[in-house]
Image: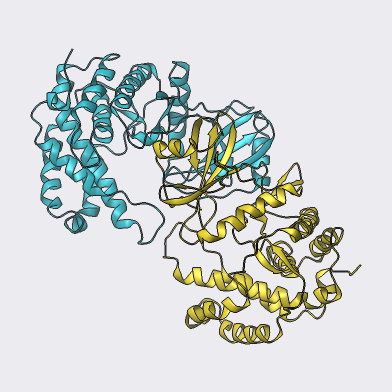
Chain colours: A cyan, B yellow
Amino acid sequence: MAVYTDITDGQLKQFLTGYSIGALTSYRGIAEGVENSNFMLHTTKGEFILTLYEKRVNEADLPFFLGLMQHLQHKGLVCPLPVLRQDGAMIGKLAGRPAAIITFLEGTWPRQPGIDHCRQLGVALAQMHVAGADFRLQRRNSLTLADWRPLWNKCADFADKVVPGLVKDATSDLEYLESNWPRHLPHGVIHADLFPDNVFFLDEKLSGIIDFYFACTDILAYDVATCVNAWCFDKDGTYDLAKGTALFEGYQSVRKLSGDESEFLPLLARGSALRFMLTRLYDWINTPEGSLVIKKDPKEYSSKMAFHRNVKSSAEYGLVRL
Amino acid sequence: MAVYTDITDGQLKQFLTGYSIGALTSYRGIAEGVENSNFMLHTTKGEFILTLYEKRVNEADLPFFLGLMQHLQHKGLVCPLPVLRQDGAMIGKLAGRPAAIITFLEGTWPRQPGIDHCRQLGVALAQMHVAGADFRLQRRNSLTLADWRPLWNKCADFADKVVPGLVKDATSDLEYLESNWPRHLPHGVIHADLFPDNVFFLDEKLSGIIDFYFACTDILAYDVATCVNAWCFDKDGTYDLAKGTALFEGYQSVRKLSGDESEFLPLLARGSALRFMLTRLYDWINTPEGSLVIKKDPKEYSSKMAFHRNVKSSAEYGLVRL
């Protein structure tokens, strides 16, 4: 939640001469998004989001992220649409950073997702997986199996101080995942970060998906597993079978999961929990005390790793194969 | 720039049932304002700003701040207007905090104020001073002369490390100001924080003044002196006589400054520079390293203190008495 790069009104007006979106009437920095600087623009033609891509985002990945939004929109999914510059480009330069303008989506994200939210999320996720099948660009997941061990090596010394017993658990999980990762499962475009704050609802209907800046080409069922982790546990850490059941029903109403996908789901969910535990642990250790960034507790995800370790079958998540 | 208190969509929808501003379609945290949490709301009836007042704001002061905006609007000044609740109240409670909704003002604040911005600012400042004359509430300035010494005592030990020589300069300035503060000058409602980021322009015309959360009852010319400091120095620290001249011409086209006000302006400007140096120094020392809050350099204001120390007459600021 931050604006890392501020921009002057003069810079912005100059930048906007490259677009056909009317005259600027106001802009405000938005306190959302931990990777980039985001501004809400008002112009005489409507509302837009301006994003300045900060150093953590690789400029070479922008055509994938923005092209994907365009592709998904054309396929009928609601997500922000990159606004083209007059010269046809999607990306410009502002205050020394790559910058893009995307359309503004109405809606609010559910702070307390319920069963029906999970069902609608499942539908949208599967629609995204299907719609992404003929997207022509590919992008390697930069936070997948091969990246976990280097990240873990940077955190392991401190891990037991944050979560007692974590060193033993994470080490054995990592070994198990490295030996058993189901590389043969169907791949495609995944969102890879589809937490509730990236899904908008309006009048209780899913109104759009945002923030494709972790999207990549990877195992589709891994994306489902990430949603299980992000949507189907209650605040106290217990798995909510009704939410899981709804998520899978929604998903499979659009795309059926195979026997293999179902079989490996506990392993994928354990991997996804490890991935989010690792980045949270890294940030936990590396974010200065007193900083305004709200640190997310890695414990939430080490508990989820433990939960998945004990799951014998995807039926325990509420998955009924069709 | 922060959102200190997040709110759930459920809490917000419940809160909005107390208002007649339509149905919520979206809300986003705004990365502006260092004291409170601000959200931009979209509803089916338009756009609004929701503010949650954090601990640094005294709840007992809210009727002054919000009542003042209402008063000034009724007098024809453009500033945000508090939206009344259905029960007529201006303040409600949300997420355990006092909260209010105000109207959204279009416009952008000038990152590089020019001569004409200064002239328009002067006009608006004088209009505010005149319009405030019959506002019935009073509020003591909580960052005036009497408050500077306690603040200085908390920072003095570290001051020379931040700005070499500051201890000697600030100590003697403080003594001088305490002995010579012109308590007899005309008092009234002052904004007390009218920096460029609180003044919006649209198509190069001043379109509104925001952020009245330092407003109070104090010496009117002190408010002018604060604007001199905030608007009339160039980036390299030199005083811009053309900007000063324009500011005073604008101001005096609405309200003439008296001989006394003119005479004491260098002292008031020195006091105002000390006040902003002190709060910046305090924050400089007390903000953790690596925090996302951008620390403002106290040096900028210790240099301004030095400048004002050498001013012999307000003519050096560009003030020509009418």
| Marker count (numbered) | 0
Question: In this orientation, does residue B237 appear?
Answer: no
Left or right, A123 with respect to B49, comes to: left
Question: In the image, is residue A27 above or below residue A242?
Answer: below
The part of the image, by quadrant, that contains residue A114 is: top left
The spot of residue B3 in percent (x, y) is: 46, 50
Residue at the extreme right: B322
Of residues A222 and A108, which is closer to you in this image? Answer: A108
Left or right, B212 with respect to A64, comes to: right
Left or right, B98 with respect to A48, comes to: left
**Residue at image point 43% right, 19% down:** A77
Where, quadrant-wise, is the C terminus of chain A in this rendering?
A: top left
Of residues A123 and B14, which is closer to you in this image? Answer: B14
The spot of residue B317 in percent (x, y) is: 80, 70
Of residues A118 and B261, which is closer to you in this image? Answer: B261
**Residue at image point 48% right, 58% down:** B293
Left or right, B205 with respect to A303, comes to: right
Question: In the image, is residue B144 above or below residue A254?
Answer: below
**Residue at image point 41% right, 56% down:** A292
The part of the image, by quadrant, that contains residue A162 is: bottom left
The spot of residue A245 in percent (x, y) is: 21, 23
Question: In this orientation, does residue B290 appear?
Answer: yes
The spot of residue A205 in percent (x, y) is: 40, 22
